[in-house]
Amino acid sequence: MRAILLAGGLSLVLTLVGTRYAIIVLARHGYGQLIRDDGPTTHHTKRGTPTMGGLVIVLASVLSYLAACLVTGRTPSASALLLMFLFVGLGTVGFLDDYIKISRQRSLGLRSRAKFIGQTFVAVAFGALALAPWFEDSRGQTPAGQTISLIRDPKDLTLPAIVVVLFIWLLIAGTSNAVNLTDGLDGLAAGASVMTFGAYTLVNIWQNNQWCGREPGPTCYEVRDPLDLAIFAAAITGACFGFLWWNASPAKIFMGDTGSLALGGALAGLAVLTRTEFLLALLGGLFVIQTLSVILQVGFFKATKGRRLFRMAPLHHHFEMLGWEEITVVIRFWLIAGIFVAAGLGLFYAEWVAGG
């Protein structure tokens, strides 16, 4: 528990202080956000606001996790190192996307094919390594399970490794893009991420307390490194919380694709490493709704030859176009995110009470 508190607290402080300096440096170099011309007109005042703040989130999270391990004498586990690889890898793809937008002064960064290739490479490498036998612990547990689960691995189901890797790839690509779509209003993605990563911190703490490696039993959890995952999840939670201080309306800085892709990838990675892949759809329900709104908008537009289901997608822009104030949309969407997180944690606990 000491390592968890240390990682979360240190990450919070680093992000609070680091983001302030990042705003100064990014503004000095002219690394400002470009705004879509077809978006809400109220967003045009945000043009030039420093972006790529996700760099601070990524660096603070990684440094805080490593510092917590160093202070408490822990050796970073395979699960945490894989999660770090996924977090930093997708953050790098997002950074390239942001940098191209800024350097070429256009609202689109990496070409969709290049972005897809980058996400695919990182996701497939993560999935393959998470199932690799050389990452087995003394009990024969690999970081990821060779199945797809809601809360724990089914005992009578084993899928081919290639199927699991493909599913992991889809989950990572979908979740990283979902958080990216949600990052459209001041503080929306950061606030929702605080709640979702906080939920995964609690999930990992509970799994560690009921870990099969310590107390085997009918309701224990077969997760390779639950405590280390809790430490990393706490570090990301603290980083998002600290970043929100500067990202809340009116935002002084945006996380950009650097932050949103990294956070989405880390959420998917935690779902895979905690054996709660399907539970992520509930814990991250707000991100699911945002993605579905875009899918429905595109599908309806094509099916009706030009008609729109929403005034604008993702969904948060629809309510802005209806005349809602931005801060009203953000707070109400935070409430929705909180309801989904509470429901997900409730389901997780109820499954344990029911005896697995």
Image (cartoon, helix red, strand yellow):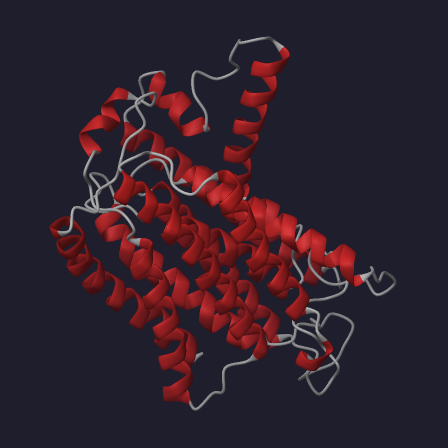
Q: How many marks?
A: 0
Percent across and percent down for residue 154 are: 80, 61
Q: Is residue 291 above or below residue 227?
A: above
Q: Residue at x 28, y 40 (%)?
A: 104
Q: Residue at x 42, y 43 (%)?
A: 110
Q: Is residue 344 visible?
A: no
Percent across and percent down for residue 186 are: 29, 39
Along the line of sight, the residue nearer the viewer: 54 or 139: 54
| Quarter of the figure with residue 227 | bottom right
| Quarter of the figure with residue 66 | bottom left
Q: Is residue 327 visible?
A: yes
Q: Is residue 166 left or right of residue 172?
A: right
Q: Residue at x 60, y 45 (%)?
A: 281
Q: Is residue 80 above or below residue 257?
A: below
| Quarter of the figure with residue 68 | bottom left
Q: Residue furthest bottom?
A: 73
Q: Is residue 102 left or right of residue 195?
A: left
Percent across and percent down for residue 54 are: 33, 54
Q: Is residue 336 left or right of residue 148?
A: left
Check the picture and name the quadrant holding the C terminus: bottom right
Check the picture and name the quadrant holding the N terminus: bottom left
Percent across and percent down for residue 75 are: 49, 87
Along the line of sight, the residue nearer the viewer: 350 or 274: 274
Q: Residue furthest right?
A: 156
Along the line of sight, the residue nearer the viewer: 329 or 179: 179
Q: Residue at x 52, y 53 (%)?
A: 118
Along the line of sight, the residue nearer the viewer: 354 or 31: 31
